[in-house]
Image (cartoon, rainbow, N blue to C red):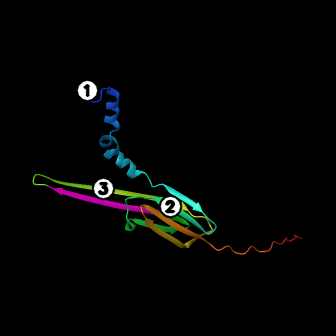
Amino acid sequence: MSNLIKNNGNLFPSVLSDFFGADKFFNNPWLEKELERTPPAVNIKETNKEFDIEFAAPGFEKKDFNVKVEDNVMTVSAVKKNESKEENERFTRKEFSSSSFSRSFTLPQNANTDKIDAKYVDGILKLIVLKKEDTKASNKKEIKVS
């Protein structure tokens, strides 16, 4: 403990920096695993002509994504697997990791599921779902019951 006091002159800043230090807290493998399990944030915006849906999904590649629509439910999923191997004269180390997510959304009735555009740029997956053309409103007519 005297080592801590000698280094910083104060015990508490040393304890806090030891706990919150970049190497011990923010680069912690446990914290990284927890962040991998968190589904990506999604922004949804509706305009007069379309629905804009954006997923914050950094670290993936275009080939990792799967977007499908079934019975007006759109499901967006992604799977990424990594493997690294380090060989030394005394040991071989292999590490495997996998990141994945799946999110589903019920599309509104006016969504045109035949016209969906998907782009992945700079860690953002952007989906544009066009709206169906509005059918002309029919003239209202009152019918008397006899």
Residue at the image position 24 percent from the left and 24 percent from the top: 2
Towards the viewer: 43 or 30: 43
Q: Quadrant of the N terminus?
A: top left
* Tally of marks: 3
Q: Is residue 118 above or below residue 19?
A: below
Which residues fall within the magenta stretch?
A: 75-87
Residue 112 appears at what percent x and percent y? 58, 71
The residue mark sitting in front, 1 or 2, is 1
Quarter of the figure with residue 14: top left
Quarter of the figure with residue 71: bottom right
Q: Residue furthest top?
A: 2
Residue at the image position 35 percent from the left and 33 percent from the top: 16
What amino acid type should be assigned to the residue bearing mark 2?
Glu
Towards the viewer: 77 or 18: 18
Structural distance between the alpha carbons of marks 1 and 3: 41 Å
Residue 74 appears at what percent x and percent y? 51, 65
Q: With 112 as the anchor, is 35 left or right in this view?
A: left
- Return the residue at label 3: 97
Q: Earlier in the sequence, mark 1 or mark 3?
A: 1
77 part of magenta stretch: yes
Mark 3 crowd level (few <14, some 14–19, many ≥20, 10 Å Cα): few
Residue at the image position 58 percent from the left and 61 percent from the top: 45
78 part of magenta stretch: yes
What amino acid type should be assigned to the residue bearing mark 1?
Lys
The residue mark sitting in front, 1 or 3, is 1
Mark 2 crowd level (few <14, some 14–19, many ≥20, 10 Å Cα): many
Quarter of the figure with residue 143: bottom right
Structural distance between the alpha carbons of marks 1 and 2: 51 Å
Q: Earlier in the sequence, mark 1 or mark 2?
A: 1
- Return the residue at label 2: 54
- Return the residue at label 1: 6
Of helix, strand and loop, which one carries label 3?
strand
